[in-house]
Amino acid sequence: MAPFDMTATFGAVGSALVFGLFGFGFGAVLELGGFGDTRKLAGQFYLRDMTVLKVMFTGIVVAAVLVAGATGLGLLDMSRVWVNPTFLWPGILGGLIMGVGFILGGFCPGTSVVAASTLKIDGALFLLGALAGVWLFGETVGSYETFFISSNMGRFTLPDWLGLPTGVTLVLVVLMALAMFWMGELAEAHWGAGKAWSEIDLRPRGGKALAAGGLALASVVVALIGQPTPARKFELLGEAARKPVEERAIFVHPAEVVALRKDINVQVVTLDLRDEHDFNLFHVGGAYRVDPQALLTPAGLKPVLEAPASTVTFLVGNGEGSALSTWKSLKALGAQNLYVIEGGVNGWLEKYAAPACVAAPDPRGTDQASAADALAWRFGYATGDALPAAWPELPVSHAFRVPCAEPVSVDRGGHEGITWPAYTFEKKVKLQSKAAVKGGCG
Amino acid sequence: MSEATSMPAAPAGTTTPSASPAGTSEAPAQAAAARGPRPYLNPYLAGTLLGVVLFLSFYVTGGGLGASAAMSRVQTGVLDLVAPGHVDRVAYFAEMAGGHRNPWLNSAIWMMVGTILGGATSGLFNGRFKPEFRKGPNITTGTRVVFALLGGAIMGYGARLARGCTSGQALSGGAVLSVGSWAFAMAIFASAYAVAWFVRRLWN
């Protein structure tokens, strides 16, 4: 599924050519639209000539409809598309500064490149100034780094913010753009062509009305198609995504989890997908209980998708069923370094058993319980992660509760002398960093 | 926008001296230059084409269009030739060109090269590829030079602070509905409109 892994698909030279080709289209279209002429650009801010508004926002909404349409039809994997992260206040301040530069210099960076490419001397001068500006920024940003990296909201989109489906947001954005175009036309007729307000025909006519209707209709169609659910998206990802599941490459032996927890270079996060009852009876040491549905909401996804590259996230259920389906959904949404604990909590307790006086095996047997995603042990009371079995890497801990008839003693420090079998396992966790897809301004 | 505000002395229909002399080769470009500049494309059509190019860029490369990253790399690359030690010590530059990192071999640079070629090609076929100096009708050349440089510097500075320019942040981020990109786009327009009245002499 698109987008493509550039160097793997086209080679180093080929991908350079592809980027060059898109640049070529970009430059040509800007030139055709009149963005190489500084007076046309400046005219925008005296309401004479609304070309900037029209070209730019037509470009944005047309691309937005096409992108959302392509993801809706399962042709484009949005999780691998670069969405500019939101650094709200540095972005707004940068925008305010750029607005001043725009009206003083009469270009923005991209348009000055186009102006210079058609030998416009003022464009080349602006470009020179811009190079000085980016240099000055590099020299000075170190002195206010904290502001530069502040208000980082990560990948944060209008649908996330409004809590609306992507398609509905898209329709609203298109309608807003059309309203802006309409006002732009009126402004141009009055301040550009010098017509009195009374002479201006308020109704959009002919080709413009038709095009506006077509665009609005297209956005409604995209909204009706909707976006694929995470589970459906996983199916669309096809063979490459299914293979690790079929080869069981994503199921990690409990002993490997324990070994990774001892590795100071790796941050291990365990997400327990079971209900509160089972979680309280026993869970893997340090696990967080999360609701599988809540995990797929924007707020739930954020910590998983934006975890540092040194973080390994394990999903665990009683068996493997619920963890696997959540794994597929998260994978489809772009999660990295995500694995499932082999055999779930039942598998864990087979390797690292709870004392017999605390938990008795379910008469149905582990396999049957795991198939039903049910806990295969009957606990006498809630142990949380206060049993040594939850922390096999710790020989002693004051947090351990001494089970059964023995009195609790802080001084004894729990269960001295428990030794777990040394399991051999196939290493499956391979740390990967997110493919560095970056936009033109990365 | 009328041609009356045009700065160059050459009226429409004449080629400027520095354009290559008329010849039989490069016939379409020469013919275009001889006819004078063609009118610009309908802005909605140009915008639609821009949207299609932007979408294709997202579809194939996973990223949008942009210009300021390439500028930053060109600037860092030049600085790396002059003062490599300094580049290594300033974190912002070192990220692009520290040690053995090559700031030139980067997708943003390829895109910038393409943008220049695309702009030049379109200009060539539409009779707009000629040295010109454009400014508002009531200011001197010197004033325009100063404000082009100053405006460029302010724009370049702001573009890096905002992590992108009008194309890389507002256009590309806007199309994938990033909240920050929309806030940024509003900020540019708001600020330019707010200042426009005070500097109206530059353009009117």
Image (cartoon, coloured by chain):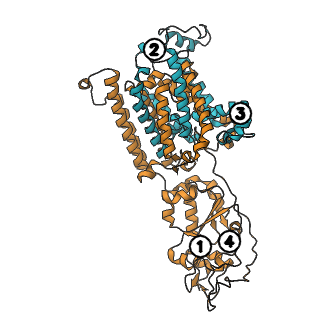
Chain colours: A orange, B cyan
> Is A428 rendered above or below residue B188?
below
The one of B61 and A84 positioned closer to us in this rendering = A84
Instruction: Give the alpha-carbon distance from disc 4 to disc 3, as whole Å.
Output: 50 Å
Residue at 74% across, 37% down: B85
The amino acid on which the numbered mark 2 sits, given as a three-letter code, is Ser
Q: Secondary structure at mark 4?
A: helix
The residue that mark 4 highlights is A254
Find residue B187 and report its horizontal and vertical position in percent.
44, 38
- Nearer mark to the viewer, of 1 and 2: 2
Do discs 4 and 3 share a chain?
no
Q: Chain of mark 1?
A: A
Q: Which residue is farthest bottom? A: A405
Q: Chain of mark 3?
A: B
Residue at 42% across, 48% down: A167
- Nearer mark to the viewer, of 3 and 2: 3
Q: Chain of mark 4?
A: A
State which tag comes first along the sequence, 1 or 4.
Answer: 4
Quadrant of residue A280 within the rendered picture: bottom right
Quadrant of residue B120 within the rendered picture: top right
The residue that mark 3 highlights is B80
Q: Which mark is residue B160?
A: none
The amino acid on which the numbered mark 1 sits, given as a three-letter code, is Gly
Instruction: Give the alpha-carbon distance from disc 4 to disc 2, as whole Å.
Output: 75 Å
State which tag comes first along the sequence, 3 or 2.
Answer: 2
Q: Which mark is residue A319?
A: 1
The amino acid on which the numbered mark 3 sits, given as a three-letter code, is Asp
Question: Dots 3 and 2: beta carbons under 8 Å?
Answer: no
The residue that mark 2 highlights is B6
The amino acid on which the numbered mark 4 sits, given as a three-letter code, is Pro
Q: Residues within 10 Å of mark 2 (few under 14, many from 20)?
A: some
